[in-house]
Amino acid sequence: MKHKKKHIKLKPKKQSQFLNRKMIKKIENYDEQIKENCELKLNMISKNNQEITQLKNQMKKSELEPIGLINLSLEKSINILRIKSWIEIYLGLEVKILNIQLALYYENNDFYIIDIDKNENYKLKKDNKDIINVFSIFEVMRQVKPKNISSLIAIVDQDIYDPFQPEANIVGRAGNKKVCVVQVQTEVDVFYSTIVHELLHTLGFGHCNYQDCLMYANISTSMQLCQKHLKQLSHLKKIEELKRYKELLEISRTIGLNKECKILEKLIENFETPTKSKENVLL
Ligand SMILES: [Zn+2]
Ligand SMILES: [Zn+2]
């Protein structure tokens, strides 16, 4: 009995074990199928998500708000349309010349900015040598800055000073909340360099250690950006390097940036004959 019982008992157990194993295997297989399916779906979802993020980023890039430009200088020779084109080519971002009637004027020993549309006068701070505190221009700019623009640049022809370094002879300054001021310069290289340098500060660019980079703290030896900063710029908007250099060369010729034209011609030449440039690097 013992034996029999054992046998009887054993049989169904074996069977059940067998069945179980079979079932488990089936379940395992099924599980694996589900798992695979899930993984496939998860992969698809993450891929979709990646595509969505990429699309979102692309949209962000293409929907990047334009840069605002205001001319506060009295100098008639200032070609504001040329400045607009220069910024657009250099940064690859749209520039809007703002339709705000602002004028900077001097009266009874003081400087003012008048907003003609709103008939509002803003008194600017200055030092005893009649040099304007650039921060007081920033304050006005922040008040008149429209919402649909990213950075705002103002061109002035008065001397400006930075209260944080009053002894420094500054040609431009960027403030927070994406505003910057550039003073008209007789040296076109310095003037046009400063315009993009200050705007890049408002777009989050810091200073560079390379003297050849436009983001060098002092006047740089070239108006071009180093590779690191060029890459940073391409994060804002995709850059077609050769096309950009060619357009920069064209506008640099129009402006009369003679030294820069030579640098750009070399850059373009290196692009068009890559093997030759490699040899040059090796030499
Ligand atoms: Zn700077
Ligand atoms: Zn740099």
Image (cartoon, grey):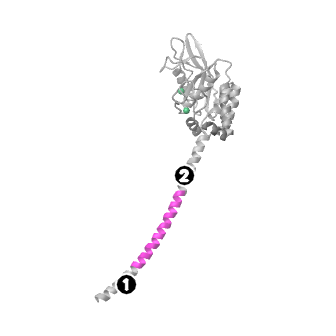
Q: Determine the secondary structure under disc 1.
A: helix
User: Please, what is the three-letter code of the amino acid marked with disc 1?
Assistant: Lys
Mark 2 Cβ and ligand 2 under 8 Å apart: no
Q: Is residue 178 above or below residue 113?
A: below
Label 2 neighbour load within 10 Å: few <14, some 14-19, many 20+: few
**Residue 32 part of the magenta segment:** yes
In front here: 274 or 4?
274
In front here: 43 or 70?
43
Question: What residue is disc 1 on?
Answer: 11
Write down the region rendered in magenta. 17-43
Name the quadrant containing residue 216.
top right
Image spot of residue 242 (x, y percent)? 67, 38
| Residue at 51% from the left image edge and 64% from the top image edge | 36
Q: Determine the secondary structure under disc 2.
A: helix
Q: How many marks?
A: 2
Side of 187 relative to 164 (left or right): right
Residue ranking furthest to the front: 283
Q: Is residue 112 above or below residue 47?
A: above
Q: Quadrant of the N terminus?
A: bottom left
In front here: 29 or 115?
29
Image spot of residue 175 (x, y percent)? 52, 26
Indicate which disc, 1 or 2, sits on the residue closer to the N terminus: 1
Image spot of residue 142 (x, y percent)? 54, 27
For the residues labelled 1 and 2, the Cα–Cα distance comes to 54 Å
Question: What residue is disc 2 on?
Answer: 49
Q: Are marks 1 and 2 in contact (CB under 8 Å)?
A: no
Label 1 neighbour load within 10 Å: few <14, some 14-19, many 20+: few
**Residue 248 part of the magenta segment:** no
Ligand 2 is found in which quarter of the picture?
A: top right
